[in-house]
Amino acid sequence: MQRGAAQDRFRARREAGQEPEDKTVVDFIEEVEEQLRSDRYLAFARKAWPWFAALVAAIVVAFLVVWGYDTWRDQNVAKASVAYDKALTALTQGDQIGGYNGLDPIAKSGPAGYRTLALLQQGNIRLAAGKSDEAATLFEQASKAAPNPVLRDLASLRAALALMDTAPLPRVQTLLTPLIGQNKPFDLEAREALATAKLGAGKTAEARADFTALSLTLGVSQSMRSRAQAAVELIDSGGTAAAIAAAKTAATLPPPKPGSLPGATPEGAQAPQAQGEPGNAQ
């Protein structure tokens, strides 16, 4: 159809004297082909233009969404940082209730990093007040909110330690087992805590084997090795009750603070001092 239209236009131009009589067939064919290509390009442009416009619009919208999200995130991090510092100041001044309440908005809807730290701080406050179940719940929420594996495992370890005296062994094992393994940041602390939990649950033989293995593990600190060896000696001498008391005291010592661990500081947050640590509560 397009070729016929081009032929009609060619004839019309010849009849009007716009085309020379001696124009060759080759010239005619080339002109027809050029006209056909031009028509195809125009048709393609008409069809493609809506898609091209949609693509440009999508790129613009995506850019605006990313820019808007980054702006919103930065503003939220800044607000959370200010609120977190105010809450820590209250805790430092001995205002446990004010500090806890100041952390509450961050713990509920703050950025992931600050939300994790706020929940950890609230758990410390509850633990220092003797409310171990509430503390464990807050620590588990912190583990779920954590933006990186180090903070996640730290929160899970704190939850297990908070439940050491009240929860059955399977509950504590559920929290500690995922923390044990090569390249796990709290492998040794989790192994010591699990051995302690087994000892408290009456699984003396398993606990002794775990303490023995821990005392022989490369990389164990001298204090941890000494505690493990002392636990084995107490078990062997029949002083199981004393071993349980000593092991629980050691296992429930606060683990390292978030800011002191490589990779543990959440993005956008400085390494804060933990407040309300067990045994150090104001």
Image (spheres, helix red, strand yellow):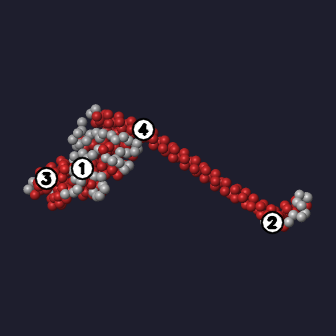
Residue at x 70%, y 56% (from the top left corner)? 46
Identify the residue under disc 1.
161
**Residue assigned mark 4:** 78
User: Which sits earlier in the primary sequence, circle 1 or circle 4?
Assistant: 4
Distance of mark 1 from mark 4, alpha carbons?
Answer: 32 Å
Single out the residue that lies furthest toward the left: 237
Quarter containing the N terminus: bottom right
Mark nearest the camera among 4 and 3 is 3
Q: CA distance from mark 4 to mark 2?
A: 71 Å
Kindly indicate the quadrant of the structure image that contains residue 200: bottom left
Label 3: few (<14), some (14–19) or many (≥20) C-alpha neighbours in 10 Å: some
Element at label 4? helix
Q: Looking at the picture, which amino acid does disc 4 mark?
A: Ala
Q: Do the CB atoms of the residues marked 2 and 3 lie less than 8 Å apart?
A: no
> Considering only order in the chain, which callout, 2 or 1, is on the residue closer to the N terminus?
2
Residue for badge 2: 29
Q: Are marks 4 and 2 in contact (CB under 8 Å)?
A: no
Per the image, label 1 sits on a secondary structure element best described as: helix
Mark 4 to mark 3 CA distance (whole Å): 48 Å
